[in-house]
Image (cartoon, grey):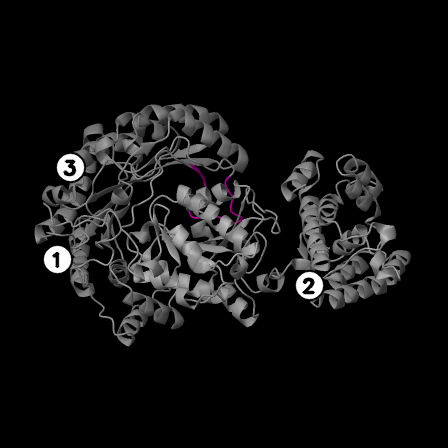
């Protein structure tokens, strides 16, 4: 029986949540002890069964030992429940309350192991025998007969523990935890322990000892950021749905936890089993944004994994990456054994199968090494192996594409974070790819092929997600939700189904030119949130250059619909530093703000009301990204961007009625250098990380001067060296990194 099977049995018999957690903790510890003794050569005496300890019986009995904990004589009642399922485990459950250390250690049985484990696990984690007994002594301090019995058993248990340590040649904590990191002392030193404890609703804890590929999914930012990323949830659920794979999670530790790990001499660990990240077969990072690169370095250092692939030995994990930044993997290539370019679902399954076969051959004594797996992995579509590229053997890498989104895996039971995440809601991906061809958009060109889920599938997935999570908000996700065919009907149907459940619907990524009155009316019926739109440029000429199919008339039309419906807050997003940008384009940004304010006043006069109109103009800095038609364009320097921002800040202020927000120009400069970098950037990233850089996408942690010092120390120019049609692009071998010239 598996851990999951036992959990279902506990749930079927109504075991309370704290009892389930304790049973799982005891079962884990008991099986680890049994494995350690068996691997060290322990064999039972003939009169108690002979042979090695039965770790399956130990596990089943440990997981179910308190199944009847709520009632009297729970050991005997529990045995009656378990015996029809597994007779041997039922016998252990009946005897788990009586710890025995026989004069002849060979007469130790499975029941002794479960009994000992029960006495070392508090709630769901190992704390040690002394701490567990101290709990009992405090609880029964006013009952002398119980205290006497506890003291009588303590000597027996401590002698058994000492014998096990001597027989296995290891510390008992290491044995009982299977090498897992003891996190309780660490949690006492951090502000938000919920980031590190795991065990959330929807999380999966699979048998560590099963013959499976062990995959640790790593997100190089805080827990609450990573848990909002739908792709992370998809791949976590997909891998754990495979019988031959085990997937756990790790996130970048906040500064207080990083300090606790270093001072406590503890390695970075996974949330599910708390195993050191370095003992997994694969550590898989998702690279969502360039300013997370230093967190990758810091996490590998904390995990005690050799930083560069050239330094890793046969016992080290494979370190791989996927995500949007793989459009140009070269700046991070020295750190990663391979990259997954494009959609990750099929690629990861193929990689796991290749790795399973490689591990099996290695376990059978085959003469296989790391390089053999990497050569096999390079045969998978979408996989880039930098070490083979060094040898001149890597062909052009084609992006992997999931062709059938309708039947692609999507988690019906997503993990519900312990603490509030950035997007705290249920979500379903309704469409992948984009009908638009905005020339600056890396995501749009990376996923240009449009694939959709049917309305029926979308409704079914949302229904399952709500039933399994308890969220009161759902979201429809895509690069352009407003372009989904029949979006109005889908929104209408969903709102009718969600209204009785008091669940609201969120619609991100709406397009001005595709937004219809019916959609806004439906949204206004239950929630008048702010409306966000992205004209991107201030003039129609520049919007045409961008292929941004939005006009000023579209913007005014939305205001005419939205203001009478009660919408008050509006956000307009623009970019500066765009190719062909002129002063007139900058003036157009302020002009659109003035036009919107004037429109709101005119509509109020027309309807005899004064609309409480709030407008925020938000400006970001254009960063040319690999794989787009603008990849060869020059990104503006910090001084040039600042000049534009100061000009706009004053121009928007004169509009009287609009707030102005802008993105840090220094952060955009570093983002550009990393996005368009080559392998020389790896040394810069390492230097910056070792000198304190981390969480660089957070303004309060970003240190521009530190980055400039790192570039200088490594002899790498802090400038865009890949502009113009003559430049040989480092990422040209990635399909999609075409020879684009300036258009428009």
Where disc 3 sits, the SS reads loop
Q: Relative to 265, is 636 on the left or the right?
A: left
As drawn, the label of residue 724 is: 1
Q: What residue sits right under mark 3 in the picture? A: 551
- Is residue 212 or residue 9 the one in the foreground? 212
The residue at the point 65 percent across, 37 percent down is: 8
The quadrant in which residue 711 appears is bottom left
Q: What residue sits right under mark 2 in the picture? A: 173
* Mark 1 nearby-residue class (10 Å; few <14, some 14–19, many ≥20): some
Where disc 1 sits, the SS reads loop
Q: CA distance from mark 1 to mark 2?
A: 61 Å
The residue at the point 35 percent across, 27 percent down is: 522
Residue 111 rendering spot, x and y as whole percentages: 80, 50
Residue 696 shows in this picture: no
Q: Which residues are magenta?
A: 414-427
The residue at the point 75 percent across, 41 percent down is: 67
Residue 430 rendering spot, x and y as whole percentages: 37, 33
Residue at the farthest bottom position: 713
Residue 53 rendering spot, x and y as whole percentages: 76, 52
Residue 193 rendering spot, x and y as whole percentages: 55, 57
Q: CA distance from mark 3 to mark 1?
A: 30 Å
């Amino acid at each position: 029986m598996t851990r999951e099977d036992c959990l279902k049995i506990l749930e079927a018999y109504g075991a309370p949540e704290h009892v389930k957690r304790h049973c799982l903790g005891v079962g884990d510890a008991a099986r680890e002890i049994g494995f350690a003794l068996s691997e060290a050569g322990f064999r039972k005496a003939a009169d108690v069964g002979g042979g090695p300890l039965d770790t399956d019986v130990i596990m089943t009995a440990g997981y179910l030992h308190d199944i009847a904990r709520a009632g009297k004589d729970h050991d005997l009642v529990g045995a009656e429940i378990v015996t029809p399922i597994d007779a041997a485990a039922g016998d252990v459950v009946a005897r788990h309350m009586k710890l025995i250390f026989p004069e002849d250690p060979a007469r130790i049985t499975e029941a002794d192991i479960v009994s000992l484990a029960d006495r070392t696990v508090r709630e769901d984690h190992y704390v040690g025998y002394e701490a567990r007994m101290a709990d009992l002594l405090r609880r029964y301090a006013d009952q002398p007969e119980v205290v006497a019995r506890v003291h009588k058993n303590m000597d027996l248990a401590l002698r058994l523990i000492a014998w096990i340590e001597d027989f296995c040649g290891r510390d008992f904590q290491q044995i009982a935890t299977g090498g897992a990191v003891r996190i309780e002392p660490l949690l006492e030193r951090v502000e938000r322990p919920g980031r590190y404890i795991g065990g959330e609703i929807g999380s999966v804890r699979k048998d560590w000892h099963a013959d499976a590929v062990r995959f640790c999914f790593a997100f190089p930012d805080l827990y609450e950021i990573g848990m909002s990323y739908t792709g992370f949830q998809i791949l976590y659920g997909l891998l754990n749905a495979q019988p031959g794979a085990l997937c756990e999670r790790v996130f970048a530790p906040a500064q207080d936890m990083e300090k606790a790990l270093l001072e406590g001499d503890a390695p970075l660990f996974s949330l599910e089993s708390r195993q050191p990240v370095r003992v997994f077969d694969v550590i898989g990072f998702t690279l969502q944004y360039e300013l997370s690169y230093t967190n990758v370095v810091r996490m590998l250092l904390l995990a005690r994994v050799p930083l560069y692939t050239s330094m890793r030995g046969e016992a080290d994990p494979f370190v791989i990456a996927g995500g949007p930044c793989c459009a140009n993997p070269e700046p991070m290539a020295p750190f990663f054994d391979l990259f997954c370019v494009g959609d990750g679902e099929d690629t990861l399954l193929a990689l796991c199968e290749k790795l399973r076969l490689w591990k099996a051959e290695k376990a059978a004594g085959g003469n296989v090494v790391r390089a053999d797996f990497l050569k096999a992995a390079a045969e998978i579509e979408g996989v880039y192996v930098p070490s083979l590229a060094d040898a001149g053997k890597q062909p052009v890498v084609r992006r992997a594409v999931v062709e059938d989104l309708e039947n692609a895996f999507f988690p019906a039971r997503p993990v519900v974070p312990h603490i509030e995440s950035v997007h705290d809601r249920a979500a379903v991906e309704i469409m992948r790819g984009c009908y638009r061809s905005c020339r600056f958009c890396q995501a749009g060109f990376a996923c240009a092929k449009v694939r959709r889920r049917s309305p029926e599938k979308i409704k079914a997935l949302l229904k399952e997600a709500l039933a399994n999570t308890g969220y009161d908000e759902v979201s429809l996700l895509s690069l352009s939700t407003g372009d989904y065919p029949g979006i109005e009907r889908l929104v209408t149907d969903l709102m009718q189904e969600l209204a009785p459940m008091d669940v609201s619907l969120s619609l991100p990524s709406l397009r001005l030119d595709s937004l219809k009155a019916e959609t806004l009316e439906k949204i206004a019926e239950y929630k008048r949130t702010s409306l966000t739109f992205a004209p991107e440029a201030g003039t129609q000429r520049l919007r045409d250059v961008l292929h941004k199919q939005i006009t000023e008339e579209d913007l005014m039309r939305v205001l005419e619909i939205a203001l009478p419906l009660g919408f008050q807050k509006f956000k307009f997003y623009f970019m500066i530093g765009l190719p062909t940008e002129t002063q007139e384009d900058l003036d157009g940004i302020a002009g659109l703000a003035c036009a919107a304010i004037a429109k709101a006043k005119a509509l109020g006069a027309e309807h005899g009301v004064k609309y409480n109109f709030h407008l925020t103009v938000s400006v970001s800095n254009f960063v040319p990204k690999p794989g787009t038609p603008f990849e060869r364009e020059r990104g503006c320097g910090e001084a040039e961007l600042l000049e534009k921002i100061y000009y706009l800040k004053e121009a928007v202020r004169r509009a009287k009625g609009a707030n102005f927000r802008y993105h840090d120009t220094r952060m955009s400069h570093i983002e550009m250098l990393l996005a368009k970098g080559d392998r020389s950037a790896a040394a810069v990233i390492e230097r910056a990380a070792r000198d304190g850089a981390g969480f660089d996408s957070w303004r309060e942690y970003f240190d521009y001067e530190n980055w400039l010092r790192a570039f200088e120390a490594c002899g790498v120019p802090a400038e865009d060296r890949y502009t113009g049609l003559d430049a040989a692009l480092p990422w040209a071998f990635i399909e999609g990194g075409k020879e684009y010239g300036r258009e428009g």
